[in-house]
Image: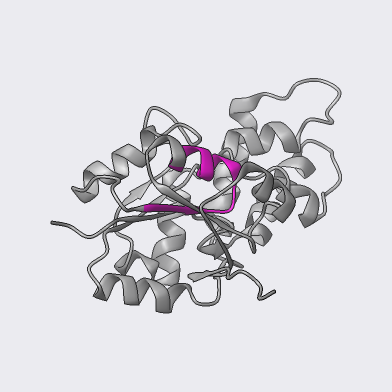
Amino acid sequence: MSKPPILFDLDGTLVDSLGDIAASANYVREQHGLESLAEQEVRKMVGDGAAKLLDRALADLSAPPDQAAAMAIYVEHHLQQCTKLVQAYPGVMQHLQNWQAAGRPMAVVTNKPERFARLILDHLGLDKYLPILIGGDSSPARKPSPIPILAALERLNTGPEGGMMVGDGLQDLRAGKAAGLKTVAVLFGFRDEITLRAEGADEYWREFGVPERLQPR
């Protein structure tokens, strides 16, 4: 019998990619005559895939942009940008190594387009622990649908029993619950703690791989 699986979101969970995402989003804004946004503003726009990111980043245009053209600009820029600033969060490498050694099936389920996610995993050396990747364009639906999670479990040849979905967004928690997984909300990612706690998770991590403990009375 296989051991319980662990599925991870990417941005804001395994890696801090905000600088690269903001750089590419702002490049698209500049091509449309708009001023750059602060990273903290871009942070609020991340989580639902590149198309939604651009919809939000270009929302202050006087007329709706050509979405296909905006996406083409973003893709061209981000293919070069996505590995420039990104870093794995502290503890990620060691915990992935430990879980792999323990025989835990692991995969990444992200709403980020697969080509960018794959470049990041390869660049940071995370691919040796996480060869299974479901991107935002890899399945018929994105999180919060459970469909991409179920696709990852199928590729891992395992079920949800005893497994967990780890992420920093409401999409991750909702998709994990719908797929029958325990949910883990990371509190160091892109979403604020109040929002995550209001949504509710089975477990919270302030540090990667370290469950939050109840404070002594």
**Of residues 196 and 109, the one drawn nearer to the viewer in this rendering:** 196
Residue 99 found in image quarter: bottom left
Residue at the spot x=76%, y=33% of the render? 58
- Is 167 one of the magenta-colored residues? yes
Observer able to see residue 68? yes
Q: Is residue 158 left or right of residue 186?
A: left
Q: Position of residue 77 (x, y in %)?
A: 60, 50
Question: What is the quadrant of the N terminus in the image?
Answer: bottom left
Residue 170: say if magenta: yes
User: In the orientation shown, which residue stands out farthest toward the top?
Assistant: 63
105 left or right, relative to 134: left
- Residue at the (79%, 30%) spot, across then down: 59
Residue extending farthest to the front is 217
The outermost residue toward the left is 1
Q: For the point 55% across and 49% down, which residue is it?
A: 201
From what the image shows, is residue 121 above or below residue 117?
Answer: below
Compared across the picture, whether 73 is left or right of 158 comes to: right
Q: Position of residue 98 (x, y in %)?
A: 33, 77
Q: Give me the residue at 72% from left, 25% from top.
A: 65
Q: Which residues are the magenta region?
A: 164-176
> Where is 211 relative to 158, above or below?
below
Q: Quadrant of the C terminus?
A: bottom right
State which quadrant residue 69 falls in: top right
**Where does the image place residue 175, in percent across and percent down from the top left?**
47, 38
38 vs 59: above or below: below
For the question of whether residue 136 can be seen, the reply is: no
Q: Nearer the viewer, residue 155 or 162?
A: 162
Q: Position of residue 25 (x, y in %)?
A: 69, 46
Q: Is residue 134 above or below residue 10?
A: above
Closest to the observer: 123 or 215?
215
